[in-house]
Image (cartoon, helix red, strand yellow):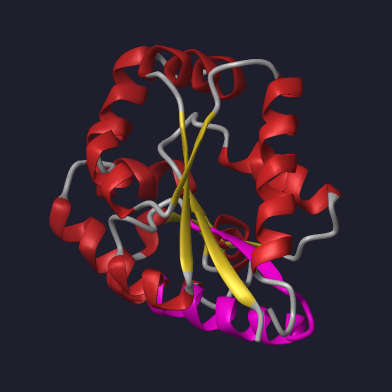
Amino acid sequence: MTIWIGLTGGIGSGKSQVAAIFASFNVPIIDTDAISRSLTAENGQALPAIYDAFGAEVFETPKRLNRAVLRERIFNSACLKTRLEQIMLPLIRSYSRQMMNQYQQAAFGIIEVPLLIEKKAFQKLVHRILVVDSAESLRIERVKQRSGLDEPEIKRIMANQASRSERWRAADDILLNDGSLQELQAKVGRLHRYYTAVFRPNH
């Protein structure tokens, strides 16, 4: 049986970088954000339900979502955010399970779930939780550099995510990403060796 490790952390913590390093060790990686983007891409499977729920004003064309408009609407309404999650989260979980079934020979795999702590239904997919964490100021700076968002917008996103203490309480493993890329690679390498030893077949 493949052991699935849920990889999570707040915005700017470095989850995707950690996933990429695990991938360099040939560890199976499932990215739920990528699944979400495919479901909402042009002609994506989630679009009909989103159209029914939100109307034409969140679409550029009937087959192409206007992500900026939809994002603004759900940020301003908890009700609309919940409605979108009711459409998206079951689809994402279903696709994740389908992908997991493709890796039944692996000792362990990584599933990257940004909202793993907040959306507890996703925790049923995993056997262990790995939290990537960094100082808030460093996370803000990383997001500024990669996305162009300003600090108030980044803090608004952070305020809608689990707190550091909530993540730490849920974690089986915590990886601090406050240093260089080389330091992060070394830390992930140690975790990889540990997981490989613990979860090897017939252990």
The N terminus lies in which quarter of the figure?
Answer: bottom right
Residue 131 position by quadrant = top left
Which percent across, then down, holds residue 149?
Answer: 46, 20
Residues rendered magenta in the picture: 89-113
Which residue shows up at 40% across the image and 19% down it?
Answer: 135
Which residue shows up at 53% across the image and 19% down it?
Answer: 178
Answer with left or right where residue 71 lies relative to residue 37.
left
Prevailing secondary structure class for the magenta stretch in the rendered image? helix
Answer with left or right where residue 98 lies relative to residue 72.
right
Please tell me whether residue 114 belongs to the stretch shown in magenta: no
Which percent across, then down, holds residue 128?
Answer: 47, 64
Q: Is residue 28 visible?
A: yes
Answer with left or right where residue 181 lies relative to residue 112.
right
Which residue shows up at 47% across the image and 14% down it?
Answer: 138
The residue closer to the viewer here, 49 or 83, is 83
Answer with left or right where residue 94 lies relative to residue 69.
right
Q: Give the total number of marks visible in the rendering.
A: 0
Which residue shows up at 49% across the image and 57% down it?
Answer: 113
Which percent across, then down, holds residue 202?
Answer: 72, 85
Which percent across, then down, holds residue 38?
Answer: 63, 65
Q: Is residue 51 visible?
A: no
The C terminus lies in which quarter of the figure?
Answer: bottom right
User: Does 158 appear above or below 7?
Assistant: above
The residue closer to the viewer here, 162 or 168, is 168
Residue 158 position by quadrant = top left
User: Does 1 appear above or below 82?
Assistant: below
